Image (cartoon, coloured by chain):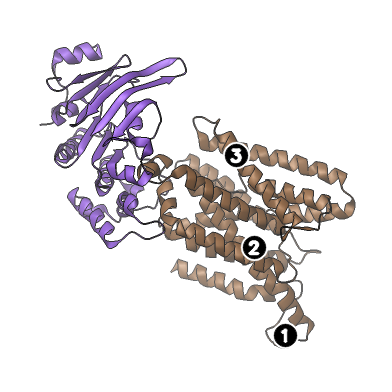
Chain colours: A brown, B purple
Amino acid sequence: MNRTLIWLFALGIFFLSPFIGAVNLELSDILHADTLSAQIFYELRLPRVIFTFFAGLVLALSGLLFQTLFRNPLMTPYTLGISSGATLGAGIAIKLGMSSVIFGIAATSFFGFLGALLTIFLLLFLSRYLQGSQQTSLLLLGIALSLFYNSALMIIFYLGDSIQNDMLIRFTMGSLSVISWNSPLVLAVVAVFFTSIIYSYRFELQLLSISEESALMKGLESKKIVFWLLFLSSICIGILVSICGPIGFIGLLVPHIIAKLYQQSIEKRIMKTAFFGGFFLIFCDTIARALPTQSEIPIGIITALIGGPFFIYLIISKNKGV
Amino acid sequence: MIEIDSLSCKYANKTVLSEITLDIEDHLTILGANGSGKSTLAKALCGLIRLEGKIEIDAQDIFEYDAKERAKKIAYIPTKLEFYDEFITLEEFVLFGRFPYKASFMNYTDKDKKVAREKIELLELCTLSKHPLSSLSSGETALALMAQALTQESDIIIFDEPTANLDPRNSKIIAKHIKGLKQTHQTVLITHDIGLANFIANPVLFLKNTEGFYFKKDFFTDENLSRLYEVEIESLAVKYE
């Protein structure tokens, strides 16, 4: 019952969201193709909602993936510093004024997922030197890397001129304002690809959620699969972050909400987490647009305001052994 | 058939096992004091760690097996089950035993599900099959682990201290099942529970001072136990009969 209501609410937000914002639109407006309202709807709002949906999907799913692979509810690309790595990469590209296209990909995107990949390799490399309570140490490594990246980004700020800095600040706080259909389409392809890979590995993930050792004893080449899935999700996160900046806490919140709501094994939660992630980010974005502020509040701030306290709750409840 | 050929293990400057050589045709119980290398040997047998020397199962090096093929040969039951997914049910957990038989990217077949169900029935876990693992007691978890290993339909099953966390009643239930499995599987039992080892009555490999002492039979005498464990042992503490 609760579940149905939540999904209905999510769907409701999905359909209402494009009409809400600095200019509220009416259904009748969008039926006439040549009005300003129709233009806003088709060129700004709709691409944005679609983009937001897939962004939320990738974030939530990669959260679930990381939590399963590391068997820890606090693991996400964001808490492990992978998002920060991508941000720094993209930030460098912005600072260097790179607007060119490498291998058919925008330079910021390319640098973004280079940053994400570099971070995951660094984490995997460093984790070989960890002993004992590996998971906690890995999390601390991620946080250390985040801090390091942030400082590096600060240096870029000091070197930049005010126009670049304005772009950078907007970028580092996360922004879903996409113009035209380019980014939503790119992200849609990435998200569908990502989701189908994760879904096709659902039984392997379920095995890995027990332990790498037991997965190995069941005939799963754990190390290979873990590496491949982390590699893949880093690419996806890299692309996502390079377009919309780092958006935190979705990967933490959504898998947890779905787990509490359904109480099913991970394998059965994959698709639910993916879809709910999409709807949840649309919900957050709708709040950001609906608030009557001078300029739009960056989405990263909204998700952090909701997610920060939740993160603390997770740490406390984890220590209680819940 | 397991062949261990001059297996050695050193940690930093401490030698744990030196030149262990043994052909295991029959069942085997591995005993030894804490830190004598029992678990190391068990992990090596499973191919989880790589030591100096060589281990062959059915005349093939364990590291030359494809992971799934190896899983069809050997199943390992750990002392303690740790898991992250708190909502996974016993039924789903037991079904993992069929993973080595499952085609990549495909769902488990009806046959897989049937095998899992049979093993759940065999161990009298039917009433718990829809329950999440996290709600089971230690005794029930031990049975769930056993059901999963049986579902794996391997030739060999390794039990790593199966009664370490169990009360006497559950220990007896597990002991009875292990004894029963000797009919269908080659069993390797690692334990500190002398009563259990005596009841299972496998040949014994006693690990002491990095060496292995093999007893085909007649191991369980007070004299043997006292000498090897270096403590007065007068009679077996727990009787499983």
Q: What is the C-alpha distance between the residues marked 3 and 1?
A: 51 Å
Q: Which residue is mark 3?
A: A123
Q: Secondary structure at mark 1?
A: helix
> Is disc 3 in the same subunit as disc 1?
yes
Identify which amino acid the numbered label 1 is placed on.
Asp
Residue B232 shows in the view? no
In primary-sequence order, the first of circles 3 and 1 is 1
User: Looking at the rendering, in which quadrant would you find the N terminus of chain A?
Assistant: bottom left
Which of discs 3 and 2 lies nearer the camera? The answer is 3
**Marks 3 & 2, CB-CB < 8 Å contact:** no
Pointer 1 chain: A
Identify which amino acid the numbered label 2 is placed on.
Cys
Residue at 53% x, 49% y is A228
In primary-sequence order, the first of circles 3 and 2 is 3
Q: Which residue is mark 2?
A: A284
Position of residue B203 relative to residue B152, above or below, is above
